Every structure is written in structure tokens, then in C-alpha cells.
Amino acid sequence: RKEVEQDPGPFNVPEGATVAFNCTYSNSASQSFFWYRQDCRKEPKLLMSVYSSGNEDGRFTAQLNRASQYISLLIRDSKLSDSATYLCVVKWVGGGADGLTFGKGTHLIIQP
Amino acid sequence: GAGVSQSPRYKVAKRGQDVALRCDPISGHVSLFWYQQALGQGPEFLTYFQNEAQLDKSGLPSDRFFAERPEGSVSTLKIQRTQQEDSAVYLCASSFPTGGTGNTIYFGEGSWLTVV
């Protein structure tokens, strides 16, 4: 069974702090990796893709470790507006549907 | 429209009732997906269309679930004889073009189904 595992949290973090969370995936043939953000009662939205060499977008840094089959997301200088659920998303080789497999999400709460 | 549009946004159905959920994808998007998201869970894949062809329906939980996209644009997800375990948000997403590893998919706001 193809699985994507995340710590559901919640992670309670003071504003301005750095927070990181990981996601593990079971299928070594996984092809593409993403972090999506989902606000309460809203739809998921793409936050960033995750590249093998690691990539950064402002305060957000994503890393991929193929050997250990995990991806990570690091948020620096966290803002109140970063409070959301962060979904780890994996696309499998031959994943037929062209669709994505989602983790259950990590709930992040930034506290003032 | 500018984004993926879903209707109804909220639906309360009595157990045993049939429901139909509509998705209007972004204009020109070839791929259309349906996901089911239960409370506290991540979205779970249901089915996938490429134009009007339903290429993958492996995620549909039972034969009570049926999806169609007859003209390759608007799609309808139908649930027959609804059960309480069907209560969830049903998310529609679309993308263009097909294939590839990095195509972004865009979600609608979802149809919130509660079966009582």
C-alpha cells in the first residue's frame, strides 16, 4: 500500500520561531513531491514543490531525502498567518491517475 | 470562471437519499479529479478524468459512487443511497496539461456533505 505519513500535531509555536516538520513516504519509486497548505474549511493550495537539491521560497525551505524517503518543510520567522494544516503530497511513478497522494496533514498553530 | 467551481457548497442529505455534486473546472483544463476528505484527514483520491474519459476510478469506495464528465468539461459525482460514512468534503480539482510530474492541480472549495 502506498502511504504518506505525517505527524498530525498540533504544533504550537510562538510567533517568530522556526518550525520544521517531516513527512515519510513508503514507495521508493515516488516521483514528485509537494507541500500543500490547507486553511480551516478551505481547499488545499500548492505551497511549494520539493526538489532533490532542496529549495527555498522566502521563509519556507523544503528538503527531500530519497535515501530515507522523507521530505521536510521548514518555516523561519513564523507569522500568525502561517497557522494552517500542511499537507505532504507525493506523486508515484506510474501513478496512473496523474493524481496525488496526500498525507493527513500537520496542524500548525502560531501563537502571538 | 477563474477557478474551479463546485456546487452545492453544503448539502444535508437523509440517509438513503441520492445526491449529485457538480464540478465546473477551470476552462481548458483537461484533467479533472475528485477527492474525498473526511474530518481531520487528508484528501483521498476517488477518480480521474482526462477529457470525457474516466481513466481511473479505483478510489471510489463502493458501487454507490458514480462520476461522469460527458462533454469533457463539467463533472458530476453521484452518490446513491447515502450512508453516514459518506459525510465528508468532496473536493474537485483540475489541471492542464495532462501528464508530467509537476503539473499544479487547482482545487475547488469543496462540497460539504452531511448525511443524517
Image (tube, rainbow, N blue to C red):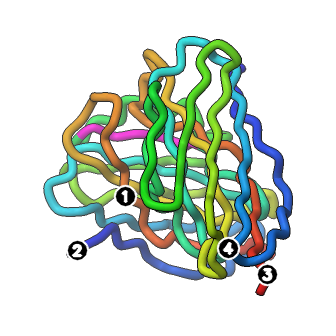
Image quadrant where one finds the N terminus of chain A:
top right
Q: Of B51 and A53, which appears nearest the observer?
A: A53
Neighbour class for label 2 at 10 Å: few (<14), some, many (≥20)? few
Disc assigned to residue B62: none
Disc 4 marks which residue? Answer: A83
Disc 3 marks which residue? Answer: A111
Image quadrant where one finds the C terminus of chain A:
bottom right
Residue A41 visible in rendering: no
**Mark 3 element type:** strand
Amino acid type shown at disc 1: Tyr
Left/right placement of residue A15 relative to residue A7 reads left
Disc 2 marks which residue? Answer: B2
Residue A53: percent from the left, percent from the top?
45, 27
**Mark 1 element type:** strand
Residue A76: percent from the left, percent from the top?
62, 61
Amino acid type shown at disc 4: Ser
Q: Quick check: do tags 4 and 3 share a chain?
A: yes
